[in-house]
Image: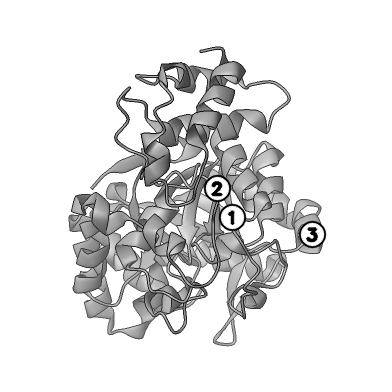
């Protein structure tokens, strides 16, 4: 298992994580065993947005005696009322629900205290101007939550979180289909019909990923499989099917992303997700699927897929493109981006203009031209 730094938190999280929402589907002992098995495979981050007692008990029992191995995303504002999940900012519900997660997980701290599910401007304003956010800060000051995070499906809200200065990471929905969809406050529309005119990554989403990396606000990924719809050509908006490994690779190649949290029913599904770490470049290749899809296109956009390799000058073209994209969104090249760029083994100025990379790019990116622009921007 490979591990990545989760932004400015400094935490090292497994590239493949555990989305815990399916735990309650099974007998408690079975789910406890499944979660422990995932830990044995190197998975060390789990999201618990679920307020139901059964899911929380399962996680607590699975972590018992091994709490230090796990990085827990625990949500503040996900409450259990009359046997039902209710998203709430009312303190009479919020406080008992958070205290319950500590009790059932048999822990005195949560690694990532998540401001739960904010998708609208109105909800953001409500959260930021009530006793709810003061409670989040109080938990952080006391060390009960080690870092403050936020979960959202809306790139505009995610951008606000990145720019807030106090939110250190976000849980965000990422997959090739969602990335084509413009910002919305209604999650249901993202699962609806996709207009065939949609083309490439929505600019607000691309800008969010670049800003997150530049500001070191780490991203963990939810809904990476589009509810399983991407696995079937009949339900995929692209008209062609992806594999789990391809979806995982797509998420992990977005700037700022540290981990993708997958849902599991069986050990075999854990094995399938973890197999990403030993998968070949051909098995990871999502770009060819998108480029040859009968519906939609990412033409002209660099998706950092790495198809352009190898370069005779040994330039890591995908990384050069990423740092260029990070830099041009600012009026002045951020020093952190400049230093990362200069640390590359070969910079854009090493390009000999052979354009062999362009013949391999599935999206028709004018790479040699971008190398020239990058050289001019960074001065080397």
Image-based side of 61 in relation to 124, left or right:
left
Q: Quadrant of residue 32?
A: bottom left
Instruction: Classify mark 2: helix, strand or loop.
Output: loop
Q: Quadrant of residue 97?
A: bottom right
Alpha carbons under labels 1 and 3: distance apart: 22 Å
Q: Which badge, 1 or 3, is on the more N-terminal residue?
A: 3
Q: Nearer the viewer, mark 1 or mark 3?
A: 1
Instruction: Classify mark 3: helix, strand or loop.
Output: helix
Q: Which badge, 2 or 3, is on the more N-terminal residue?
A: 3
The x, y position of residue 266, in whole percent, is: 24, 76
Q: Nearer the viewer, mark 2 or mark 3?
A: 2
Q: Which residue is mark 1?
A: 201
Image-based side of 356 in relation to 322, left or right:
left
Point out which mark residue 121 bears. 3
Q: Are marks 2 and 1 in contact (CB under 8 Å)?
A: yes
Alpha carbons under labels 2 and 3: distance apart: 29 Å
Q: Nearer the viewer, mark 2 or mark 1?
A: 2
Instruction: Classify mark 1: helix, strand or loop.
Output: loop
Q: Does the image show residue 106?
A: no
- Seen at 81% across and 52% down, the residue is 129
Name the residue nearer the viewer: 65 or 199: 199
Relative to 39, residue 308 above or below: above
The x, y position of residue 161, in whole percent, is: 67, 46
Q: Which residue is mark 2?
A: 301
- Seen at 53% across and 72% down, the residue is 295
Name the residue nearer the viewer: 353 or 220: 353
Alpha carbons under labels 2 and 1: distance apart: 8 Å
- Seen at 64% across and 44% down, the residue is 207
Name the residue nearer the viewer: 16 or 184: 184
Q: How is the image coloured?
A: one colour
The x, y position of residue 175, in whole percent, is: 49, 62
Relative to 35, residue 284 above or below: above
């Amino acid at each position: 298992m490979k591990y990545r730094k989760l932004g400015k938190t400094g935490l090292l999280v497994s590239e493949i994580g555990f989305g815990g929402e399916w735990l309650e589907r099974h007998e408690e002992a079975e789910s406890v065993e499944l979660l422990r098995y995932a830990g044995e495979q190197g998975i060390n981050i789990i999201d618990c947005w679920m307020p139901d007692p059964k899911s929380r008990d399962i996680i607590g029992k699975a972590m018992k005696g091994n709490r230090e191995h796990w990085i827990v995303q625990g949500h503040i504002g996900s409450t259990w009322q009359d046997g039902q999940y209710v998203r709430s900012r009312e303190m009479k519900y919020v406080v008992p629900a958070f205290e319950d997660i500590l009790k059932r997980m048999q822990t005195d701290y949560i690694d990532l205290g998540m401001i739960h599910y904010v998708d609208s401007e109105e909800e953001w304003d409500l959260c930021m101007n009530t006793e709810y956010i003061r409670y989040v800060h109080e938990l952080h000051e006391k060390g009960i939550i080690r870092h403050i995070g936020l979960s959202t499906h809306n790139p505009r809200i995610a951008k606000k979180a990145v720019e807030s200065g106090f939110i250190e990471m976000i849980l965000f929905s990422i997959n090739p289909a969602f990335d084509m969809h413009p910002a919305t406050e209604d999650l249901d529309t993202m699962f609806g019909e996709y207009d065939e005119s949609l083309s490439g990554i929505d600019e607000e989403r691309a800008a969010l990923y670049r800003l997150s990396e530049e500001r070191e606000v780490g991203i963990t990924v939810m809904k990476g499989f589009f509810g399983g719809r991407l696995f079937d050509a009949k339900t995929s908006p692209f008209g062609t099917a992806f594999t789990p490994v391809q979806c995982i690779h797509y998420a992990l190649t977005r700037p700022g992303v540290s981990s993708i949290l997958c849902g599991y029913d069986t050990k075999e599904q854990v094995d399938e997700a973890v197999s990403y770490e030993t998968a070949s470049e051909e098995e990871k290749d999502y770009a060819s699927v998108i480029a040859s899809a009968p519906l939609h296109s990412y033409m002209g956009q660099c998706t950092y897929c790495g198809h352009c390799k190898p370069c005779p000058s040994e330039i890591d073209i995908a990384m050069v493109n990423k740092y260029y994209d990070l830099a041009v969104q600012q009026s002045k090249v951020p020093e952190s981006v400049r230093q990362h760029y200069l640390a590359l083994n070969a910079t854009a100025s090493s390009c000999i203009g052979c354009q062999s990379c362009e013949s391999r790019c599935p999206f028709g990116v004018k790479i040699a031209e971008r190398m020239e622009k990058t050289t001019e921007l960074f001065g080397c």
